Image (cartoon, coloured by chain):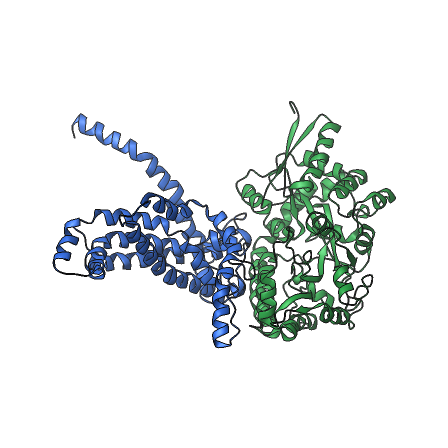
Amino acid sequence: MTFGERRKTVQGLLFVAPWVLGFLVLNLYPFCASVWFSLCDYSVLSQPVYLGTRNFHDLLQDPVFWKALRNTLLFATVSIPLSTALSIGLAVLLNQPVGAQGFFRTLFFLPCLVPAISLAILWQWMLNGQMGLVNVALRPWFDAINGLLGSSLQPPDWLNDPSWALWGLVLTGLWGTGQAMIIYLAGLQEIPAELYEAASLDGTTAWQRFFHVTLPMLSPVIFFNVLMGLIGALQTFAVPYILTGGGDGPGRSLLFLATYIYQNAFDFWNMGYASALALVLFCMITILTFAAVRFGEKKVHYEGR
Amino acid sequence: MKGRVVVEYWEKWTDFERAAMAARVDEFNNSQDRIFVRFLSVSRVDQKMMLATAGGVPPDVAGLWDLNLPSFSENNALLPLDRLAREAGLQEEDYNPVFWKLCRYRSHLWALPSTPSVVALHWNKRMFREAGLDPERPPRTLAELESFNEKLTRKHPDGSLAQIGHMPQEPGWWLPDFPSWFGGASWDGGGRLLLEAASGRAFFNWLESYPARFGGPELFRLRGAFGNFASPDNPFFNGKVAMILQGVWMDNFIRKYAPAGFTYGVAPFPETDEHPQAPLTIAQTDILVIPAGARHPREAMEFIAFLQKQKNMETLCMEQRKLSPLARVSEEFLRNHPHPYLREFQELAQSPRAQPTLCLPTMKEYTNDMLVYANQVLLGRMSGEQAREEMAARQQKALQAKLERWQRVAQVRTAAWERELAR
C-alpha cells in the first residue's frame, strides 16, 4: 500500500469511525446485552441471574404475549395494505396537472408533521364514542340506515369496544399516509411519459395504464414503502400507548408487542422477560423482511435490470 | 448555595402541590446555612429514579408512592431509614399508625410520609335531590348503595344510559383493595394471593352484577362519554356518575373543574351487611425516600426531618389540601384547613378500621390485570368467576417469580441492610 493509499484509508476510517462507534455502543452492545438478559432474571437494579431458556418457555405459555402478538400482526396486516392503497391513490390524484397542486400536496402532507403524542391525543377525541368527530360524521348515515331498515345500529364506540379499538387505531394510522404519498409522488414523476404515450397509442384505458404501466414502474417504491411500513407497524408503540393512557385498551385489544416489552421492562421490572420479548420481535421483523426481500426479487420491476 | 452541601430532591408534584413543597424547601434552605435542597419536579419519577439509581446517579431524596416500596426495597434501590430516622428523633408514636405501616416493608423503615390520603364515598347532592333521595344522607350499606344506584340511574328514550348512580370502575383506582370491603385480604403478606377466598369471589360477583343489571355494552357506551379526570368532563362533575370512591384530594379538582354551585358530601364507603367490621377506608401516602447510592444521606434526612415537624407538615398538607399523617393534629389545622370535609377524612384515617392500601411486590402487574379483568366483566365478556380465576392464576405466577428473585438475594440484602443500620 502506498503512502497515498494508506492516507486515504486512514481518512476513510476516520470518517466512518463516528458511525462505527455509535453502532457498536448504541446498537451492537445493547443488542448483545439484550440477548444475554433474555436468558436471565434481571430487574435492572440487581445483577442478572442466569435462568436458561425459562423466559422463552414462560413466553410461550403467556396468553398476554399471544394476544399482543396477534394484535401486532393483525394491525400490520390491515394497516399496511390500507395505507399503501390510500397513499398511492392520493399520489396519483395529486400528480394530475390541476390548479393549486402545490397547495393540495402540502395539505395532505401536513398531518405527518404532527408529533405522535399530539396525534394520539387528537384522535382520542376524534374517536370518542359519544362526542367524537368521527361518530358525529357517521351518525347521520347510521340514522338513515336505521330509518330504512328499522334497525337500531349505533356508530362504534371506537376506543372502548374491544371489537373496534384496533380499527380505530388503523384509522389513526391513515392520518400519516402523507409521508408515503410524497415518496410515491416522486416515484410517479420518474415514470417516463413515453410509456404512457405508447400505451395510449395501443388504445389502453386509464385503468389499464395504471395497472400495466404505473404500478410496475412504481413497484420499487411500493416495495420500499411496504417494507418500511411493515417494520414500523410491527414496532407500533407511541400512539396506542397514549390512546389507552399507558394501558392495554379494552380487553387488551390495543396491547402490542412493543407496549408489552415496555411494560415488562420499565413498569414490571422484568427486563429479562422484556429482552426475550424483544428478541422474538427482532426475529419476527428479520424473517418478514427477508421474506419480503425474496418476494421483491421476483415481483419488483427495476428499470435498469 | 456556595459552600453548602447540595441535596438533590426529585418530586412528582406539579401545579399548586409543587408550589406547596417548593415553599417548604425554601423555608428549609433559609433556616440554616449548611445544606441547600435543589428541588426538581419530575414526571414519572419512579421510573426515572429507578434508572438513575441503576446508573449510579440517584437524587438524594425522592418523592415516590407507597406502592413503590416493595419493588424498590427488594431491588436494593433504597436506603433503610430506621437508624437515620431514630437519630433524627422520628419515631412510630409520632405518626398515625396506618401511614407509618405504609412506610415499612420486610421489618424495615424505608420512607417517611409526605402527604397522605384516605378514600371515602363522594356523592353529588343535586343528583340525590333529583332522584328523590335525601341529599344529606349517604348510603350506609352496600345493599343500600345499590338501591340508591337504581334510583339514581337514568336512561335515554333509546334505552342507553344517560347517567348512573355508581360504577366500581369509575375511577377504579382502588379495585385491588375492594375485596377488603367483602371481608378479606387479597394477599397473605407472603407468597399467596387470596383471590380464591370468599371475599375475592364476592367482589368479582359484585362486579358481575353491574352488566347483569345495566347491560355491558350500555355501561361501556356510557363510559365512552366520560372525559378526563382532571377536566370539567369528569363524570362526577358533569352528572354522569352520582357516587364515587375518591381520595381527600378530590376537593382540589372539584374547586377547579366542577360547575358553579356543585355540592357534594363525603362519608365512609358503605360496608356490606355480612362484614360490618371490614375496613372503613383505604389509606395511602406519598412518601419521601433516600435512594441507595445517594451522596448525602444525612443531609437528606435532615431535610426530611424538617418536613416531619408538625408545623411544617401541617402547612404542607394544608396548602396541598390534604390531611396530616401525624398522630397529633392541631386544632388550628382542622379549623383553618380549606377542605370542607377535612375532619371526616382525618377521623377516617385515625379509625382502627383504616387499612393500608395493598402493596405487593407485583403491584403494577396486579393493578394492570385487575383493570383489564374488571373491564371484561363490566362488558359482560367474562363472568366474574372466570375473570377471578384467570387473574389469580396469572398474578400468583407473577408473585412467585418475584419471590424467587427475592429469595436469591434475601440473605445478601438483609445482611447489607443490617450493616447499614449498625454503622
Residue B383 x/y as whole percent: 59, 74
Tell whether A167 sits left or right of B168: left
**Whole-percent x and y of residue A19?**
33, 37
Residue B13 point in image, percent of width and height: 65, 43
- Residue reaching furthest to the right: B331
Vertical comparison of A86 with B113: above or below: below
| Residue B185 appears in the picture as rendered | no
Does residue B413 appear left or right of residue B335 in this picture?
Answer: left
Q: In the rendering, what colour is chain A? A: blue
Point 62% across, 42% down: residue: B291
Image x and y of residue B109, in percent: 71, 48
Along the viewing direction, whichever of B107 and A140 lies nearer the viewer: A140
Task: State the residue in front, B95 or B281.
Answer: B281
Residue at (43, 50) in percent of width and height: A34
Q: Is residue A213 visible?
A: yes
Q: Residue furthest bottom?
A: A150
**Chain B shown in which color?**
green
Question: From the viewer's perspective, is A75 left or right of B85?
Answer: left
On the rendered structure, is A197 left or right of A280? left
Q: Is B8 drawn above or below residue B221 in the view shown? A: above
